Structures are given as C-alpha cells and as structure tokens.
Amino acid sequence: MIYDDISEVLLSEDEIKKIVERLGKQISRDYAGKNLLLVSILKGSVVFMADLMRAITVPCQINFMVVSSYGNKTENTTGAVKIEQDLDVNLEGFDVLLVEDILDSGRTLNYVKNVLLTRNPSSIRICTFLDKPERRVVDLKADYWGTDVPDEFVVGYGLDYAEKYRNLPFIGVLKREIYEEKEKMN
Ligand code: IMP
Ligand code: MG
C-alpha cells in the first residue's frame, strides 16, 4: 500500500481544502473583469488545478502544458527543462495564471514563464500550491502560494516520486529509504 511509504503527513485533506478556498478567493478578487487563462503545468498540478478552478468564481478558461524536469530523481541537478506538450491557444489578450504543484529550485517555472512571455499575453503570474523557499536557485517568487514546506521530498495531491504517489489525497513526506536506495543505483 502506498500509504506505508509515507513518514509524515504534512497537509491533511482538510488543510488542503482551506488553502485552496483562500487561493480561489484571492484570485477571484484580483481577476474580476480580466481575461483569466489558467495554465496547468502537468502532470504535477493536475489535482490542485481541478480543485483550484472550482474555487474560482470569475470566468476563466483552462489550458495545459506538459513539462518535465527531473526524470526519476529527487533533485533537478541539471536544471534542464523540456516542454513535452505545448499549449494549444494563442496567449495574446489573456491574463495567464500558471498553476504549479511546487516551486522548488524555481528553474521549471522560470523557464516556462519566460517562454510564455515571448507570446505576448496581457499579463502572466504564478500560482503554486507549495513553496520550498530554502531551495531556490533562480530569483523567482510566486504571486499566489498555498503554503511553505520544509526542505524534504513530498508526495501526494499530484506530486510524484518516479511517477508514483500522485493519487494520495494528502501531502506527505516520502520515507528516505524509498528514494535513497534507488538514487544510489543511478
Ligand atoms: P523546480 O524546477 O526545481 O522548481 O522544480 C519544480 C518541479 O520539480 C515540480 O513541478 C515538481 O514536479 C518537482 N518537485 C520539486 N520538489 C518536489 C518534491 O518535494 N516532491 C515532488 N516533486 C517535486
Ligand atoms: Mg514531478
């Protein structure tokens, strides 16, 4: 059972719900009268996106982008980011809000934001569910964020380790032995 691989629950389902409600209110207030386009960075933001969009009460459109950065590792050591699947919409005239699961080194969102800026949206901002500020290597701050987490590898609520654990309904810390053994072999 995947629950056995978790050492600690950091955010329960109830806590997550409260955070998402607060973000939905903030975003609905700030984007009233704008042309909001939520851009979900897949796969990690899938669960957050589904909850967040239902907590937003102003009109909005949605789109998706598949981006990969880590492979199976817990550290993005190379900093390489790849757009596996691009948006299928022209961004001109849209107030883009990037929806991401976690802001860690900042490399992924920095890269994506810069690429999308070249496409002339009316505005572009970032909404991340989790933030690990201690780990930042590029100068990037989210405009909206759910909560800070300590420098530990977390999974659940869309976040994975080697594509697993995305279906946990809470945010948990992955037991170290789960990834330390595997990463030694790589
Ligand atoms: P960044 O480019 O270092 O900011 O990393 C962003 C991406 O790395 C996120 O979209 C996640 O997919 C992944 N990531 C970073 N930290 C964690 C974590 O603790 N658990 C799971 N995935 C993570
Ligand atoms: Mg990931």
Image (spheres, helix red, strand yellow):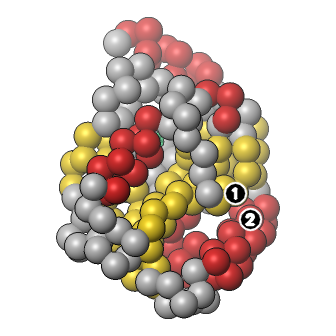
Neighbours of disc 2 within 10 Å: few (<14), some (14-19), many (20+)? some
Image x and y of residue 132, in percent: 65, 37
Q: Earlier in the sequence, mark 1 or mark 2?
A: 2
**Callout 1 amino acid:** Gly
Q: Residue at x 37, y 26 (%)?
A: 79
Q: Are marks 1 and 2 in contact (CB under 8 Å)?
A: yes
Q: Residue at x 29, y 74 (%)?
A: 92
In whole angstroms, how far apart are the C-alphas of marks 1 and 2? 6 Å
Q: Tag 2's secondary structure?
A: helix
**Callout 2 amino acid:** Ile
Q: Which residue is mark 1?
A: 146
Q: In the image, which disc is placed on residue 155? A: none
Residue found at the far top of this picture: 184
Please tell me whether residue 6 is drawn above or below residue 167 in the rendered image. above
Q: Which residue is mark 2?
A: 19
The reply to whether residue 71 is visible in this rendering is no
Image x and y of residue 31, in percent: 58, 80
Please tell me whether residue 146 is drawn above or below residue 64 in the rendered image. above
Please tell me whether residue 117 is drawn above or below residue 27 in the rendered image. above
Q: Residue at x 40, y 82 (%)?
A: 61
Image x and y of residue 170, in percent: 67, 55
The reply to whether residue 131 is visible in this rendering is yes
Neighbours of disc 1 within 10 Å: few (<14), some (14-19), many (20+)? many
Left or right: 117, with 51 as reference point = left
